[in-house]
Amino acid sequence: MNASASAAPAIQIRDLHKSFGSNRVLTGIDFHVDHGEVVCVIGPSGSGKSTLLRCVNRLEEPDSGQIVVEGIDICDPETDLDAVRSRIGMVFQQFNLFPHMNVLRNLTVAQQKVKGRSKKEATEIARANLDKVGLGGRENVYPAHLSGGQQQRVAIARALSMDPDMMLFDEPTSALDPELVGDVLEVMKTLASEGMTMMVVTHEMGFAREVGDKLVFMDGGVIVEEGDPREVLSNPQHERTQAFLSKVL
Amino acid sequence: MALKRSTRRILSRTVLYAVLLGVLLLVGLSADWATIRANFFAPAGIGNPFVGDWGTWPDLITVGVKNSLIYTVVAFGAGLVLGVVLALMRLSPVAAYRWLATAYIEFFRGLPVLLVVLVMAFGIPIAFNGWTPPGGTVGAGVVGLILVAAAYMAETIRAGIQAVPKGQTEAARSLGMSAGRTTTTVVLPQAFRIVIPPLTNEFVLLIKDTALLFVIGFAADQRELTTIARDFMASSATAGTATSLIQASILYLIITLPLTRLVSWLERKQQKAR
């Protein structure tokens, strides 16, 4: 990475628009995430927060606007999108582990086939990341035999095994039973404390308050308010933010 | 009439069994069992294993069953490969591929298999200056089976691919896998699990469809089960009787019944896994 790239934000979004048919989901988003920053995105369902996150690695195709990740314009047709994606870890609400592969293979398959690592090297990295999420020794289990919380931690370990520059979390705890949420948040806190750049779409206000460096409130396809999480949560400026927070807190 | 509920139930059951028994007795008594045995179960064909007499079974099995299975496996294997290609074409972002695959599938599903087999068996040598696939005319007939099987399998496989959740593709792409890599390592392996039961059914259908090769004529050692059974009606120990047809039926069932049982077992297993 050259000096200019590291000086630029990790994610820079300018005037982003996205519609599904006649439904305008994002209407002019300007937004950035700095290196090492943990940005939490909150908002009512349908506010466009997941779509925004999914635009960052172009799982959703933006209609217009610019998205620059680590100095690379990902909407440029000349950009090697697969290479960029391999550096952006993504964690999904529904985990999306590969059910036909055991845990170890889930963690090594992309390392070997995308990064070209040897089986030995990929296995070592996978084991280290499984230990990190507290699931060492579960290498040979299939995803169906794990609880939701365990599956999500495997999914995090899978993303980490690619040595990503940043991690995107799309409502990572929304599909979990309440008693399983804590373990997943614990892993995410550890990641944040290690300086990982993170963009987290979430309903966990406690996590946002405790770990977030910046909180973004979205509604109706625009960013209504953003700032220090403690500040925004305790003293929201905009009335839409106030209305939303009064319902969820 | 104030019969008790339980009494009424027993009464109606009894009547149902009585009717069944009556019909069976009527058929059993009016049939000419001696003639049936002579024409459908001739001892010269059925043999008597207790005294080491195997009848015509060895020929039926070593030639007929063997060839039927060879033609089935070849048609299934080649049809599967072509079917996967067609399924991927139907789901391709390139419109021309989609149209081509759709046209192919509609075309071959809309024709009688027998007609396709005939056209291929006689058409391929004409179209290619007398060249035929391995196996000569029979090989050309098998090509007909392949073309039709591929059309049916393509639709099955396409449904299987579409049944793989979208999140699987997204997870693979977000890890940096290319579209092709995602298809081969993540989507197709899961799709195949889903379509194993319907593909096994397709295999059973193909076993039966090989009987259609009957119409194109064979060298003696190329005959499949129905053809050799038909020949045995004209020339062998069982000539002039239908014994060989009964024997062939039994052999088909020995192959197909376990497979159809396997399919329903696999389907139950899949349903449980969901």
Image (spheres, grey):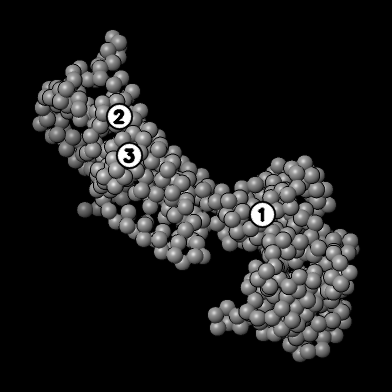
> Which mark lies nearer to you, 2 or 1?
2
Callout 1: helix, strand or loop? Answer: loop
Whole-Å distance between the Cαs marked 1 and 3?
A: 48 Å
Query: Please, is residue B191 above or below residue A191 in the view?
Result: above
Instruction: Say whether mark 1 and mark 2 are on the same chain.
Output: no
Mark in the foreground, 1 or 3? 3
Label 2, secondary structure: give it. Answer: helix
Chain for numbered disc 1 = A
Residue B222 marker: 2
Label 1 packing within 10 angstroms: few (<14), some (14-19), many (20+): many
Please provide percent x and percent y for residue B91: 49, 61
In this rendering, the answer to whether B16 lies above or below A223 is above
Which of pointers 3 and 2 lies earlier in the amino acid sequence?
3
Q: Does A158 sit above or below residue A178?
A: above
Give the camera-side residue of B22 and A157. A157
Q: Work out whether residue B232 or residue A224 is closer to the camera in this orientation and state it.
A: B232
- What secondary structure is found at the residue carrying circle 3? loop
- Residue under the point 61% across and 50% down: B185
Mark seen at residue A97: 1
Residue denoted by label 3: B132
| Quarter of the view holding residue A84 | bottom right
Closer to the camera in the image, A172 or B159: B159
Instruction: In the displayed orientation, state which residue is furthest to the top.
Output: B51
Q: What chain letter is assigned to the residue under label 3?
A: B
Q: Which three-letter amino acid code belongs to the residue tagged 2?
A: Gln
